[in-house]
Image (cartoon, rainbow, N blue to C red):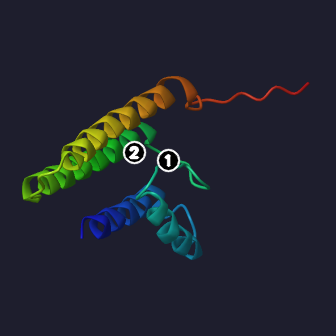
């Protein structure tokens, strides 16, 4: 249910972002692109008008979803094994690493807002 809601939210955001700038035939492509946004955010064949809002919103939604699922899983689980706690800590550490990778990308690897082409 959470993945379906995330998918529908991504479709709505893409449609809002492109509004009437694109043709109707490309909406099928946007439906597929919203499926990809469940896993990662890419600027693929569309250029975001409000890039910073997309990054902040996407990371916020994904972080909220992951924390909610982790809390529900941890509180509903009845395990007496050390694997349960090991997986819980592994999920937390991998989420922190994911956030650090995103911040590194945003700070150093993200393309600049303006690109200048020089004819030689």
Residue 56 appears at what percent x and percent y? 34, 39
Q: Which residue is mark 2?
A: 54
The residue that mark 1 highlights is 48
Decide: marks 1, 2 in contact (CB < 8 A)?
A: yes
User: Closer to the camera, 82 or 93?
Assistant: 82
Q: Residues within 10 Å of mark 1 (few under 14, many from 20)?
A: some
> Residue sitting at 45 percent across and 40 percent down?
51
Label 2 crowd bin: few (<14), some (14–19), many (20+), radius 10 Å: some
**At 71% from the left edge and 27% from the top edge, which residue is drawn?**
116
Of marks 1 and 2, the one in the foreground: 2
Which image quarter is the N terminus in? bottom left
Residue 102 at what x, y percent from top left? 43, 34
Element under disc 1: loop
Residue 85, numbered circle: none
Q: Split into 4 quadrants, where in the image is the C terminus?
A: top right
Outermost right residue: 120
Residue placed most toward the observer, 2 or 11: 2
In the rendering, at what x and y percent does residue 7 appear? 36, 66
Which residue of the protein is positioned furthest toward the front in this rendering?
A: 81
**Mark before the other along the chain sequence, 1 or 2:** 1
The structure residue drawn at horizontal position 33% and vertical position 68%, both measured from the top left corner, is 8
Q: Nearer the viewer, residue 32 or 95?
A: 95
Q: Is residue 116 above or below residue 7?
A: above
Q: Against 59, is 19 above or below?
A: below
Taking 43 as reference, is 53 left or right?
left
Q: Position of residue 11 (x, y in %)?
A: 40, 65
| SS label for mark 2 | helix
The residues tagged by marks 1 and 2 sit, at their Cα atoms, a distance apart of 8 Å
Q: Residue at x 48, y 60 (%)?
A: 36
């Amino acid at each position: 249910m959470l993945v379906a809601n995330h998918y529908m939210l991504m479709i709505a955001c893409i449609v809002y972002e492109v509004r009437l700038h694109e043709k109707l035939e490309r909406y099928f492509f946007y439906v597929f692109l919203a499926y990809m946004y469940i896993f990662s955010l890419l600027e693929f064949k569309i250029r975001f008008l409000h890039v910073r809002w997309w990054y902040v919103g996407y990371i916020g939604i994904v972080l909220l979803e992951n924390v909610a699922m982790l809390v529900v899983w941890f509180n509903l689980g009845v395990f007496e094994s050390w694997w349960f706690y090991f997986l819980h800590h592994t999920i937390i550490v991998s989420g922190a690493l994911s956030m650090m990778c995103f911040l590194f990308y945003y700070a150093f690897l993200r393309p600049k807002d303006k690109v200048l082409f020089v004819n030689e």
